[in-house]
Structure formats: structure tokens, C-alpha cells
Amino acid sequence: MSFNAEQVLIIGLGLIGGSLAKALKGGHFCRTVYGYDRDPDEMAKAVTMQVIDAAAIELESAVRAADVVVLAVPVKVMEQVLEQIAPWVRDETLITDVGSTKANLVDAAQRIFGRLPENFVPGHPIAGSEKSGVEAADASLFERHKVILTPGAETSALATRSIARMWQSTGAEVLQMEVGRHDEVLAATSHLPHLLAFSLVDTLAKDEENRDIFRYAAGGFRDFTRIAASDPTMWHDVSVANRDAILSQLDRYVEGLAVLRQAIAESESQTMLGIFTRAKAAREHFSRILTSTSYSQNMNNNNVVFRALPGGSVSGSIRVPGDKSISHRSIMLGSLADGITEVTGFLEGEDSLATLQAFRDMGVVIEGPHQGEVKIYGVGLHGLQAPPGPLYVGNSGTSIRLLSGLLAAQAFDTELSGDESLSKRPMERVAKPLRAMGAVIESAEGGRPPLKIKGGQRLKGIDYDMPMASAQVKSCLMLAGLYAEGDTSVSEPAPTRDHTERMLKGFGYDVEQQGNKVTVRSGGTLKAGAIDVPADISSATFFLVAAAITPGSDLTLEHVGINPTRIGIINILRLMGTDLELLNEREVGGEPVADIRVRYAPLKGIQVPEDQVPLAIDEFPALFIAAACAEGETVVTGAEELRVKESDRIQSMVDGLKALGADIEGTPDGAIIRGGRLQGGEVFSHGDHRIAMSFAVASLCAEGEIKINDCANVATSFPGFIELAQQVGIKVVKEED
């Protein structure tokens, strides 16, 4: 069924009512917009200014004729108006409102009608201005702003959809929320800031030197107190209508202010820094959510596209961003250490920032990041605090799996959640062994996130043989082992990256390694220090492959981590014939580092040794490109792990390379690739950053343009990729559809 509105009646022609009328007049939701206001002059002005199509001189007849009635009067008189018009509303007429409090109006509607009418859809546009009156009406007021609808259980789905469509026609984003939750949230995000602004201006105005205070007020004061110019009567009415929720938020604010006051009075620097850094980070974190960037649970709907042109070159000397794996662990272990850990080279990508935010949420004071520098004020192994809500880690598999082990041993309950992509990834591989240690963990259907972890459990060490090689599983169990009774040992069927072991030793914690087994035990401490994060070899891989497949190339990648558990990409490229040499080899903070120089040499297909697969698991999308440009056949086996990454990377690469004319066949655990020249075409990354970047590199051996769709997640692991690619000579640009 559908609902067609001929006539919309808006009662109350102030800023919100007038702006809605003007927006609806310019849209296609209804044929005629009528307006009613108790002030005849306002109605006349609205007609003259073409805010409404016509004035509703007789309210009763206008209500009886309307298909939609919008209550846009002050909160205080909303109930009176609803009671007045109730006898005239037809059964099929939709009723909605624009008030910033909902519980009081819903209660009134139930009393007036004897029940909540099924065609009543309470609503609240999160938009406004300190201006008021019909003269301030602005048809664009709601564009890119949110409107919250709070339908009840009795509300018709058709009515809710229709009112949502009305607001969407104004350019607004429509959300739904339960009535009580709406009033709680708005008390915190709208009502409290307005009351604080009123109170601050009122307090300062009483100062004997108030002229100087206001004369020399800086921009921050002006920005914050701008809302104190809002209608006092309206905010009085809101405060009365939403009293309980506002008082609750005021009490919380006063408690927080008392903590800050005490910290300032007693010069408690770490407490002050904690408040300020958490606030700054939270503001940036929430800004991402509000603007729907990649850190948000609702991803930006714009399709970020890479267009890669043939004919590029590769030369120069660059340094790619810091190693993501080491960046994650520097935050985790630095937070659990005693003392201050200073990190340089930190990767400021979405995944690493998700880990950083999680520890801030658990009470750790962290300054930065600023140009790769982070200062972590460790709280010790037992100093984490319960977070205020679920820990959201975006798209980061490393964050959720390693945090699972750490959180399983804490005294408080936690929940770990992520974005749509992460919510499809398997978590039983960590949950199962953690349960064997005594952890209590609930997962969603199919062993997927979110994970709910019950605190207060006594963990016991286990001797665990991993069924498949995974550094994330190994590290998860090692972190849990820091708290477990007895020894926690993990044996791996093939070598995996050992950053956790190296960094634990760097923090002074005892780690035993015998062959393929690593063992930790509780009772130790972590001592803070300095960490210099080397450039990420996974990020460097795209440029290593770019140079390997481009005639005339000569490229040096600086300060790259060459951990023995990560150099599969170097070994495989050398087996294929790449001219690759390691220069200036050294050790930094326990991690081996070198500059890598690559010059072009013809590549040949190979059977990739299975013992190298775990050492290059994240690099295979780019290696598929190298194989597609090599002479002969390349066979990859033993790489089934690729099917449960951010995307099914085997299938994503097979589909994309076939679209470019490659001769490739996918297998359950890898692929068979017969090299040759690539054509241009359109490919899809399926939201996987490594797929997107690999196909950008493919343009270097393609004969036509490659359009790569769904590239927004490149910032997840490699901020600045496009700029670096252009710097070395790859012809790739970013645009939004």
C-alpha cells in the first residue's frame, strides 16, 4: 500500500514549521501546503513570502480536509493543540509533530484519544537556528540533518513510512528511536548544551567586569554561547517537559566537572590530560560517526572509485606508513605497561585508531597521534577500567581478536562490535580456545561478532595446538595468558608473524620459545619504553610489485620492517625473478629493518612454496597481480585463509582479473594464474582495501583504463596511498560517484 498526500496542514509557522512548509512546497510530497498560526499577521506574512500555499483561516475545516497534520507549536502548548483538533481528525489522517521531547506528547495523545492512534507518528527534526519566526523560514534547513521518528507499537507501518517519506523529501536523513531513549539522548546532546550556554552567559553577565569579558571573548566562547540566543520561553518549556532526563544528565555533568575541578586544584596532570585527550578523541570519533566515514557503523553511501590509467612508471624513494600489526600492539602493550610509552611511526589508519580508541574508552590516557607520535600513560596489567559501552573496532580483525584475549581476563563485562564487513568474519577460532581457558564468551549466529565477554573469570593456562596458522589467534591466547594460572602455550603448524613475542620481550616480559611453541605465564610486569614502528611491509608490497612489473623501474622503499615471519613477499618475488636487494639492514626496537630497492626484471611463473604462504598471507592480492603479469603459470596452494579476510580475497581477485582478460582459475585454497597482458575494464574491491590497491597497481601492465569500485576502505590500512602512488609515477586518481 502507498499513501498519497494532497493537503498538508502545518500548525505553527515559526522557524521549524515555516521551514518545513517551504521545503514541502518545493518538493513532491504533496499538492498543497496550508499553514495555521494563532497570529493572523504571521499567516499573512507566510502567504506573502510564499512559505505556504494558503492560510488556514478556519482551523476546524483545515484539519478535517488535511491528509497530514504537523504540530509545529511550542512544546508547552502541543498538548492543548492536540486536544483541540482531536475531534476533527479523520481516521485516515496522519498526525506528526516537531517537538524536542516525546514522552509528554505520547502520554497526552493516549489520554486524549484513549489510545495511541495508529496514524500518529511523533517526530523531531535535529535542526534549528537561534533565529525565530516565519521570516527565518529556510527550505534547506533540514538538508543533511537527521529527523528522529518515535513510532509506538500501535503505530501503522504505512503511517511511519509516509511521514519518513515526507521528511526525506526535504533532504533529511530519517532515523527511528524508542520514545524514552529519544528523550534521554536529546537531554544529553541538545538540552544540556543549551542549558549550559544559558547558565554560563548568565553567570558571566553578573560579573562586575563583564564588559571586558564579552569584549575580549574568543571564538570558542562565541561558538559555545551562540545557542544562548535561542528562545528562552521555548527552552523553559523543554526543561519542564523533559525534566527527569535533563536532571540525570546535569547530575552526570556536575560529577564530571567536580573531577576536573579537583584535578586542577591539586595539579593532577594525568587526570587533566586524561579528560582532555579522551574528550578530543571522542569528539573526533563521534564526528566520524556523524559524518558516516569509514569509522562509522553506517558507511558513507558514496562509491569511492579509483581510476587507474595505463602507461605509468615507477621510480624514486619513498617511505610507506608504519606497520599496522606493530602499531596495534604498541597501543595494547603500552597501555598495560607501568610508565609512559612513547611511539613514533604509528600508523594513523582506521584500524589502528580503533584500537587506540578502545583503550581510551577503558581509561588509558593517550596523547596523539600527531604525525605518527603517540604517548601512552600505561595503567599496568590490572589498571583497565570498564568502558562506558560496547567497544566498536570498525573493520579491524586484529583489534577484535587480540582484545578478546585481553578482555576475557578483566574484572568487567565488555562487548566488542564492528562494521558490516567485520560482522561476517569468524570469531570461534579465538572464542573456542579462550573458553577452554575458562572465559565466558557469547558470539552472534555462526560465531560472528559482536562478542559479549563476561568479566570476573579465573583463567587457567592451556597447551593449545592451533589447527591453522594464525598470528591473531596466537597473540590473543598469549594476552590471555598474561593473566591465567599456570603456563599458556601455543603451538603453530607453520610460522606466523611474531610481533607480539618480540614486543613483550621489549617490554621486559618473559616469553619462552621452543621450536614452534611459545609460552607465557602470569605474574610478570610490562615496563614502558620507546617504540619506533617500522614501515609496513604489507603496505610496501604494492610498490614492490609495481616496480617488479614495470619496465625501467628503480624504486627504494625506506625503513621497511623485514621481520622473518613477514618476508614471504620478498622470498616469493625473488623466486619469480625480481631484482630486489636489502640495503642498510639494522634492528630497531627488536624488529629488523632495511631499505628495499627493486628494479625491473622479467618475471616468471612459479609454484609458490606452501611454507611461504603464511609469511605473505596479506600480500597475496598484490602477488596475484605480479603472477598475472609474469611469463608462464603461477600456482598458489595452501592459502584457504584468504577466503575469510575482509572479502573472499581469492574470489575477488579471480573475478577482477578475469574482468581484465587474465587467464586465472580459482581453487579452494588458492589459484592457478597464467600470465600475460591485461586489458582495461571495471572491477570491484568488495570493500577490501588490499583488493582495491592491487588493481591500481595492475594498471602498470594493462592496455586500458581500470575502474575500481568501492575503494572507501583504503584508508583502513594505507592513508595517503593515492598520493604516494602518484609520486612514484602510477597514473591513478580518486573520485566519488
Image (spheres, rainbow, N blue to C red):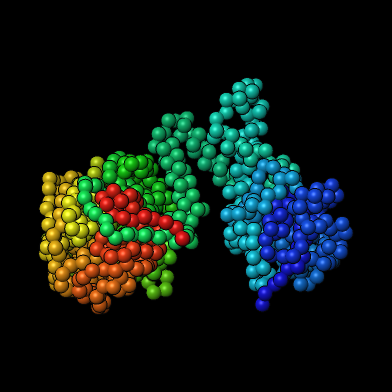
Which residue is drawn at the image coordinates 30% and 51% (left, top)?
726
Residue 652, horizontal then vertical, whole percent: 32, 70
Quadrant, the N terminus: bottom right
Which residue is drawn at the image coordinates 15% and 57% (left, top)?
600
Residue 340, horizontal then vertical, whole percent: 30, 40
Q: Is residue 201 above or below residue 576?
A: above
Residue 92, horizontal then vertical, whole percent: 76, 72
Q: Can residue 357 be seen from the camera position used here?
A: yes
Residue 246, horizontal then vertical, whole percent: 63, 48
Q: Can residue 181 be seen from the camera position used here?
A: no
User: Which of the two residues, 156 or 333, is positioned nearer the viewer here?
Assistant: 156
Q: How many numbered marks are there? A: 0
- In which quadrant of the rendered view does residue 164 lie? bottom right
Which residue is drawn at the image coordinates 42% and 56% (left, top)?
735
User: Which of the two residues, 25 or 516, is positioned nearer the viewer here?
Assistant: 25
Q: Is residue 262 above or below residue 417?
A: above
Which residue is drawn at the image coordinates 26% and 73% (left, top)?
662
| In this rendering, position of residue 42 left or right of residue 634 | right
